[in-house]
Amino acid sequence: MRRIAVANDRPARVLGVFAHPDDEVFCLGGTMAKFIAEGAVGKIVSLTRGEAGEIRDVNVASRRTLGEVRSLELTRSAQMLGVTDTECLDYPDGALADQPFEQLVERVVEIIDRFEPDILISFGLDGAYGHPDHVAASKISSKAAAMSDIKPLMLHAVFPRSGTMLMSLIVDWLSGLDGRFMGTTEFANGLMLFADGSSMLGYAADRLAVRFYPAGTFILEQGEPPGDLFLVLSGSVDIIAEDDAGSLTQLAQTGPGSFVGEDGIANGQPRNAHVVANTSVTCFVLSPGRADLAAGRGQAARPRSNEEPSPPSRLPGDYIEVDVRDFAGQKMKALACHRSQYAIAPGMFPTSLLEGIFGTEYFVEA
């Protein structure tokens, strides 16, 4: 592993070139914030306005306005990272790879020569998860860095598959609270989006699913081995204790934004109560591995046989690992600025969870 080093008689200058607004957060959010805190000057460029993205909040944007909204979101996100210089170009989102390559390279060369960066950061050649626009941004940036008079150090952001379990981080957080966590529909939606993004980029190794339970259905049975963590998205559930004589006592009723199943996972003990759908219920389920379909239910169930999380992908020996735990909260604030894509509030998740998921960024030199 090597460290980023810039020897200059002026503050280091760091340029990020990406395909869409919000790419900057995942690729270099913590690293850029760290550089800025140490006196560097930053600039972020998006080659598209992201007009083909999803719309997570209808109150924020429409299909007609999304490109303009996401351009503004990029500016706000960059400011959260300490960057005041952004450019959002107007190449078509979703078709970046179909545009004249040399023309795009020339545009980026102009930006490099004007900004004079010491370091240029973009996606790796795999585009993080194969997105054609990301791959195109990587190739364009690499070629431009080589062609420019400045010749900045070209770094590719890479995302090794992590064995970190988001479920474990959540359970640890819940176990440290004084009482039962009572979330909201907004929290449930935000965590689901956060988990989906974390899984897609390899930050977390959980298996994710959304499951529907009609009224009167057991979600969990008392006495069965612990396994999945459930987040209620809609409807309400009854938490019911059953004594040795079969008498039932309702302990609580809870709804959207609440977790069930965390106690058994935290203690490594059988489930201590039934969880039953009081109305039709939808749950977001985080699992440590593939379900054993022959495990059964109830106290006679076998302990769940889970696959071990995949080990992190191996990186080249000369990779650069940047510890950004101190900037994970800042990175989350930047992500929350992309409201059209992530319906997330800055203080929605605990610091321990953010540090566990967002605490390290990886790069390789082109």
Image (cartoon, rainbow, N blue to C red):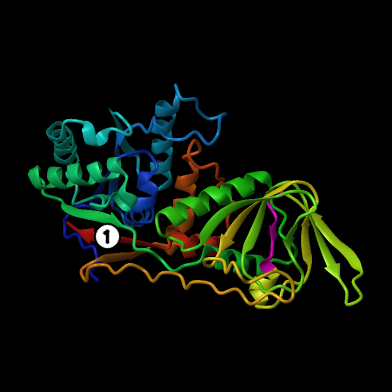
Element under disc 1: strand
Q: Which residues are magenta?
A: 256-262
Identity of the residue drawn at 50% across and 28% down: 61
Q: Residues within 10 Å of mark 1 (few under 14, many from 20)?
A: many
Q: Is residue 175 magenta?
A: no
Q: Is residue 74 visible?
A: yes
Residue 119, x across and y down, in percent: 21, 52
Q: Quadrant of residue 5?
A: bottom left
- Which residue is depicted at the point 35% across and 46% down? 24
Quarter the C terminus occupies = bottom left
Q: Is residue 120 left or right of residue 63?
A: left
Which residue lies at the image location 60% right of the left edge and 46% below the top edge? 189
User: Which residue of the protein is positioned furthest toward the top in this rendering?
Assistant: 64
Residue 99 at what x, y percent from top left? Answer: 20, 31
How many numbered callouts? 1
**Image position of 72 with respect to 251: above or below:** above
Is residue 123 depicted above or below 229 in this figure? Answer: above
Measuring from the top left, give residue 158's x and y in whole percent: 30, 58
Amino acid on which the number 1 mark rests in the picture: Phe
Residue 363 relative to residue 304: left or right: left
Q: Left or right? Give the position of 264 relative to 279.
A: left
Closer to us: 291 or 357: 291
Q: Quadrant of the N terminus?
A: bottom left
Q: Is residue 259 magenta?
A: yes
Residue identified by numbered label 1: 363
Judge by depth and name the residue closer to the eye, 167 or 87.
167
Measured as percent of width and height from the top left, residue 55 is found at 49, 33
**Image point (56%, 54%), residue name:** 209
Seen in the picture, residue 69 relative to 167 is either above or below; the reply is: above
